[in-house]
Image (cartoon, rainbow, N blue to C red):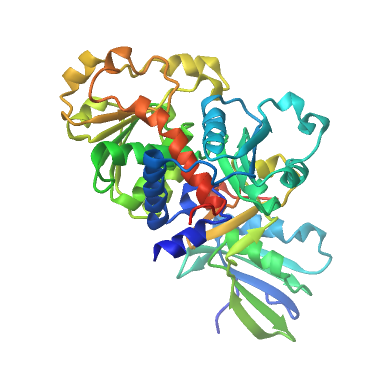
């Protein structure tokens, strides 16, 4: 039997296949310090696909669409596993929508979206590796440029 | 696509970014500019009002829009000083343009913030024309540049084009590079390392499978160029004057320099003007120089753009 590197949970969500270096960014998106149920975080775990991966298990939590979109920006290879009664009931890969609003800050300090009271808006040009174009100033941003609102 | 469809697609269109335009649409605008320059179309915009909203100073772009509108029989309102607007009272750009929308048929906007034209276009129902937003784009200047190149070379296809000077902040260079991507241009970006074309603009060219070459030395590429597009190193874009002093006057083109560069006899030199030290007046009388024709083309091209977006061409 395969030995689990991070213990299982009975109810909740497991985010797997996170690029190891992005694990704590994903943890921040999910605001895990404010969750009062079991949270398990593993980094530098072995992964055939990624070499080293991160994993986050959160008891009693189902992700919102906005949270999934944010994770897709930081960890485009991540998978989301929904666990009920210790069984895997649903598994899906995170996916970015074609446009994203209000969750990323434009990296261009002179962009109008950083000066007027408007929601930032980006068009997704490429999903993996991530390339997004600001709707307003049209500058292209990659994963390293992304700062979440 | 038939010409009627192209005309219909351009009616009520915003001119915010050159990326929004297809090759067919660009060619149609250039053809229309040629017709208007040859024959004129007085009165086709009679009764129409253009609002020139210049949140950042500009003389020639503002005046060329004003001249274009008046030559087609329209009227012009507007401002060219931030201090006289409600912005200084704290009004948002969105509110300002929604109010002004009620006074006019087309808005021409210059703004110091990048993306201000897109925000304006999203906020109003009438056409919005970007007359330069920050260091981003200046699409009407791009149509002027393309028109000048096509008139000088007979075609826009397969040209070797050198961009010289400030490619970091030079919005006209950014827009022109995007537009020339439609025409299979071979592009050479010549600049000091601190003023290179930003990497995301280069990635945009990569996305379109356009090959380009970057260098600091014009000597490396000068012999093969069909077009040399010079830009001014813009002192006003530098936050640190020391950085400006490091690069000012780094390129100085003159007749004697061109002789040493062994350029083609039919090389044409463009410059969106104003110039400072980068281009000597000794070039003005040569066949290379087309920058004054370029400046004069501003009016017929902007007439064509106004006529197209206001649906005045039958």
Residue appearing at x 27%, y 34% in the figure: B227
Q: Residue at x 49, y 19 (%)?
A: B243
Kindly give the residue lying farthest to the front in the view shown. B43
Residue at image position (63%, 34%) is B111
**In this rendering, is residue B241 above or below B211?**
above
In x, y percent, where is residue B128?
61, 46
Q: Is residue A130 left or right of residue A64?
A: left
Name the residue nearer the viewer: A108 or B98.
B98
Q: Is residue A109 visible?
A: no
Q: Can you tell which quarter of the image residue B230 is in?
A: top left
> Could you tell whether B46 is left or right of A62 in the image?
left
Q: Is residue B174 above or below residue B238?
A: below
Which quadrant does the N terminus of chain B fall into?
bottom left
Q: Is residue B205 left or right of residue A85?
A: left
Spot occupied by residue A138 in the image (x, y as percentages of width and height): 54, 48
User: Is residue A147 something that shows in the picture?
Assistant: yes
Q: Which percent across, then down, holds residue B200?
A: 46, 45
Q: Residue A85: x percent and y percent? A: 75, 86
Within the image, what quadrant is residue B25 found in?
bottom left
- The structure residue drawn at horizontal position 78% and vertical position 57%, both measured from the top left corner, is A33
């Amino acid at each position: 039997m395969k030995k689990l590197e991070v213990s299982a949970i009975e109810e909740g969500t497991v985010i797997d296949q996170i690029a190891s270096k992005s694990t704590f960014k994903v943890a921040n998106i999910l605001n895990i310090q404010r969750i009062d149920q079991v949270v398990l975080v593993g980094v530098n775990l072995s992964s055939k696909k990624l070499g080293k991966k991160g994993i986050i298990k959160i008891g009693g939590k189902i992700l919102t669409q906005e949270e999934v979109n944010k994770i897709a920006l930081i960890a485009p290879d991540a998978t989301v596993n929904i666990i009920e009664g210790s069984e895997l009931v649903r598994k899906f890969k995170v996916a970015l929508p074609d446009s994203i609003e209000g969750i990323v800050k434009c990296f261009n300090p002179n962009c109008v979206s950083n000066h007027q009271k408007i929601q930032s808006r980006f068009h997704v040009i490429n999903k993996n590796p991530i390339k997004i174009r600001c709707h307003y100033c049209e500058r292209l941003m990659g994963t390293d440029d992304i700062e979440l609102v | 696509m038939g010409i009627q469809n192209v005309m219909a697609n351009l009616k009520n269109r915003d001119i915010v970014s050159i990326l929004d335009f297809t090759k067919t649409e660009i060619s149609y605008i250039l053809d229309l500019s040629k017709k208007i320059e040859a024959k004129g179309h007085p009165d086709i915009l009679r009764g129409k009002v253009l609002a020139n909203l210049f949140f950042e100073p500009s003389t020639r772009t503002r005046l060329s829009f004003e001249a274009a509108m008046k030559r087609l029989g329209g009227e012009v309102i507007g401002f060219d000083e931030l201090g006289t607007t409600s912005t200084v009272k704290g009004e948002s750009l969105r509110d300002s343009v929604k109010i002004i929308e009620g006074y006019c048929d087309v808005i021409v906007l210059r703004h110091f913030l990048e993306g201000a034209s897109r925000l304006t276009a999203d906020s109003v129902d009438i056409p919005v024309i970007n007359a330069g937003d920050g260091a981003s784009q200046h699409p009407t200047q791009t149509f002027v540049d393309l028109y000048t190149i096509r008139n000088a070379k007979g075609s826009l296809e397969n040209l070797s084009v050198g961009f010289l000077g400030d490619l970091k902040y030079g919005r006209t260079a950014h827009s022109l590079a995007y537009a020339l991507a439609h025409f299979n241009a071979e592009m050479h970006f010549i600049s000091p390392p601190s003023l290179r074309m930003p990497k995301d603009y280069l990635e945009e060219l990569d996305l379109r499978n356009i090959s380009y070459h970057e260098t600091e030395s014009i000597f490396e590429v000068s012999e093969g160029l069909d077009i040399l597009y010079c830009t001014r190193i813009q002192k006003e874009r530098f936050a640190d004057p020391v950085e400006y002093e490091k690069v000012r006057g780094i390129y100085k083109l003159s007749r004697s320099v061109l002789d040493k560069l062994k350029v083609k006899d039919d090389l044409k030199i463009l410059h969106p003007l104003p110039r400072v030290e980068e281009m000597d007046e000794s070039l003005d009388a040569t066949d290379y120089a087309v920058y004054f024709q370029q400046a004069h083309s501003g009016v017929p091209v902007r007439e064509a753009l106004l006529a197209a977006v206001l649906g005045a061409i039958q």
